[in-house]
Amino acid sequence: MATVSQKNVTLFILAAFAYALMVHASDPDILSDFIVPDNINVIDGKFFAYTGLRGAFDFENSTTYKGVPASLKEFPALNGQSVSMAVLQFPPNAINPPHTRPHSTGLLLLIDGSLEVGFVDTSNKLYTQSLEAGDIFIFPKSLVHYQYNASPTAPATAIAAFGSASSGSVAVPSTIFATGVDDTILAKSFKTDVATIEKIKKGLASKA
């Protein structure tokens, strides 16, 4: 079970302020304090509270990466506010595979454990960094990036903040190999053969 120290909470608050001041959000500006969904008639403090992250720091018996989001889909009060977040759990040797977030910059704070992170810019240059608890890393908007817990024994926990209420996520492996693109096109694109493409698809399907 992961624990959150007062120091890490303070770091996250500081990071959130820095993020709000420095990152230009991609969501449209709104002309009211907040947006009330059509199906809600009475607004009180409960509307602005979200309890879906309770227990998100408790590790389950899993060997795969897990992200617990608090975005517009889960938390309607975020509509128009240009922010969202998620708690990320990395068991030993777990990876959040290469993906993009087309609507938002991402800011990651590592709560405990260690992570290997990186992103590729539009000139195909790779930027990597080893993170320890308390470290922050920024993933520029729309660029392909990943996180990997290389430890064979220790889990890792991180908090991710986004400059959009609905940042979106496009996973590179599944987008390329699990959306019906013709095997011949993929084989030619990756300069390999159809049998290799079929093997990759089979491997992805077995881990779904």
Image (cartoon, rainbow, N blue to C red):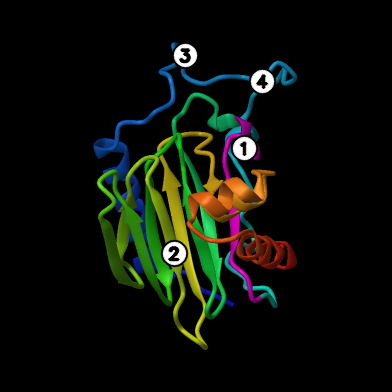
Mark 3 → mark 4, Cα distance in angstroms: 13 Å
Q: Amino acid at mark 4?
A: Pro
Q: What residue is shown with label 3?
A: 32
In the depicted structure, whether residue 4 falls above or below residue 15? below
Marks 2 & 3, CB-CB < 8 Å contact: no
Q: Whole-percent x and y of residue 88?
A: 53, 61
Q: Nearer the viewer, residue 187 or 93?
A: 187
Residue neighbourhood size for the residue with mark 1, other residues' Cα within 10 Å, grouped as few (<14), some (14–19), many (≥20): some
In the depicted structure, whether residue 82 falls above or below residue 52? above
- What is the number of callouts on the image? 4
Residue neighbourhood size for the residue with mark 4, other residues' Cα within 10 Å, grouped as few (<14), some (14–19), many (≥20): few
Mark 3 → mark 1, Cα distance in angstroms: 18 Å
In the depicted structure, whether residue 164 falls above or below residue 9? above
Residue at the far bottom in the pictured view: 153
Between circles 3 and 1, the one closer to the viewer is 1
Residue neighbourhood size for the residue with mark 2, other residues' Cα within 10 Å, grouped as few (<14), some (14–19), many (≥20): many
Q: Which residues are magenta?
A: 63-76
Which mark, by number, is residue 37? 4
Q: At 69% across and 44% down in the image, what residue appears?
A: 180
Marks 2 and 1, the one that precedes in the sequence: 1
The quadrant the N terminus occupies is: bottom right
